[in-house]
Amino acid sequence: MHIHLLGICGTGMAALAGILKEQGHRVTGSDEHAYPPMSTFLEGLGIPVQNGYGPHNLDPIPDLVVVGNVIRRENPEAQAVLERGLPHISLPEALNRFLVGERQAIVVAGTHGKTTTTALISWLLYACGYDPGFMVGGITRNFQSNYRTGRGPYVVLEGDEYDTAFFDKRPKFVHFRPRLGVLTSIEFDHADIYRDLNHVIQAFDSFLGQVQPGGRVLAWGDASLVREVCRRNGAPVSFYGLKPEVTWQADPITPATGGMRFTALKNGKPWGEFFLPLLGAHNVLNALAALGVMAELGEGPERLQEALSAFQGVKRRLEPAGEFRGILVLEDFAHHPTAVAVTLDAVRQAYPERRIVAAFEPRTNTSRRRIFQEPYAHAFEDADLILVREPPDLWKAPPEDRFSSEKLMQDLKAQGKEASYFPDTDKLLETLLSRLRPGDIALLMSNGDFDHLLSRLCQALEESG
């Protein structure tokens, strides 16, 4: 079967291309800017990619077109698909058809933590011999990939609340029918497609409504909003959290060299002692959700203890890039104010004596808007020095609704924090290099490439050593 992918260089679409290629399909694709690492990844798979969109990319005519959600209706290639009446589906529909099939889906949804939790479940299933398939929104270090086809009975999917495609504005996760679902959190995000928090809640209502009869949801029970949303939906729920009155509780939690140690309690009774080689209480919650899923499948703590200790995490999630002249450089995907705060808390817990220098790029459609202006001002409590870049592509936000890095700097200074803002990454890097000193931790936070700040910083530090 010849399958053509529009927007093939997106993380999820490139993974789908790899899955389809493994299954023996002829795969082609197009994208506006085909560049590494996805272009080289696809080249390595032998998948031809057309740089730019146009009707000519559909010759010879494919049997099926998969349309990524980056594609707009006015896209010339999408217009040609519609005008020619070519069969076309969205990414989640393609995952259901080609990856899940007759297998049972385990779907992880939530504003925060879903990538790491999906990777955790996938790894635990693999380590326990289940041969899972999976699709996750980041590169898992255990597999050096964000997908796996597998032949076992389960497929683990990261359930995204973003819209599906130009022809289907529903959240992506409504296309999945999970046997087990995980709900990690509910907060406002994606201001470009959601009006307000109630609109976001409606999306997660629809996710819970997709759980199969006889299925179950593992949900974060420390959040009253998550409990409220779960209560009004029919799926059986087991709550997990750090506080009492949950089925799965982590208590106590203690930072350890290279990670966290915790006791998992089930219904208030010790179930197992675990070491998680990731930093932060937020990652303990992710691990607790994954352990709860595995217990639902009949696993006991013994095999899971060894498996969890071998988990290597996800790239760009508090990932160490190296230590140069006594300066430890970390990179994280954090962009939402809550994610920024818990990331900094994790670093502070792990390195209580070291100075934390945080460089932050607000680049998402939401963080370019002032809706998070005040929450960001309270997100950097654990940082000692904060360097904030002006949001790139600020023109994409309405003029009256734009986030101000300068105001964030002023708000942080009013709290006694040392902070600066910069119009571009070059000036930020210049100041960062001048301010770093041995013993510091340089934490770079962005959901994009931050103008290659990580590689540029590491190279400069290495050369100056």
Image (cartoon, helix red, strand yellow):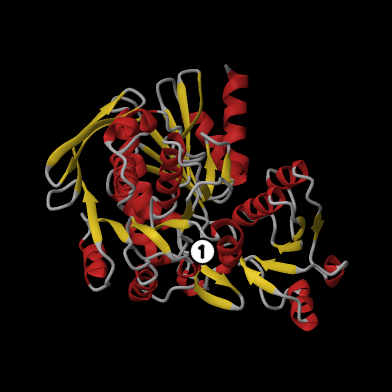
Q: Residue at x 42, y 28 (%)?
A: 310
Residue 418, image x, y percentages:
36, 40
> Within 10 Å of the Cα at label 1, are there few (<14), some (14-19), or many (20+) other Cα atoms?
some
Q: Quarter holding the C terminus?
A: top right
Residue on which the image places disc 1:
365
Q: Quarter holding the N terminus?
A: bottom right
Residue 21, image x, y percentages:
72, 50
| Amino acid type of the residue that numbered disc 1 sits on in the rendered structure | Asn
Q: Nearer the viewer, residue 101 or 333?
A: 101
Q: Nearer the viewer, residue 61 or 409?
A: 61
Q: Nearer the viewer, residue 430 or 440?
A: 440
- 354 shown above or below 140: above
- 146 shown above or below 83: above
Residue 267, image x, y percentages:
14, 47
Q: Residue at x 39, y 60 (%)?
A: 179
Does residue 24 appear in the picture of this structure?
yes
Residue 438, image x, y percentages:
43, 20
- Image side of residue 365 versus residue 256, left or right: right
Does residue 443 appear in the picture of this structure?
no
Q: Secondary structure at mark 1?
A: loop
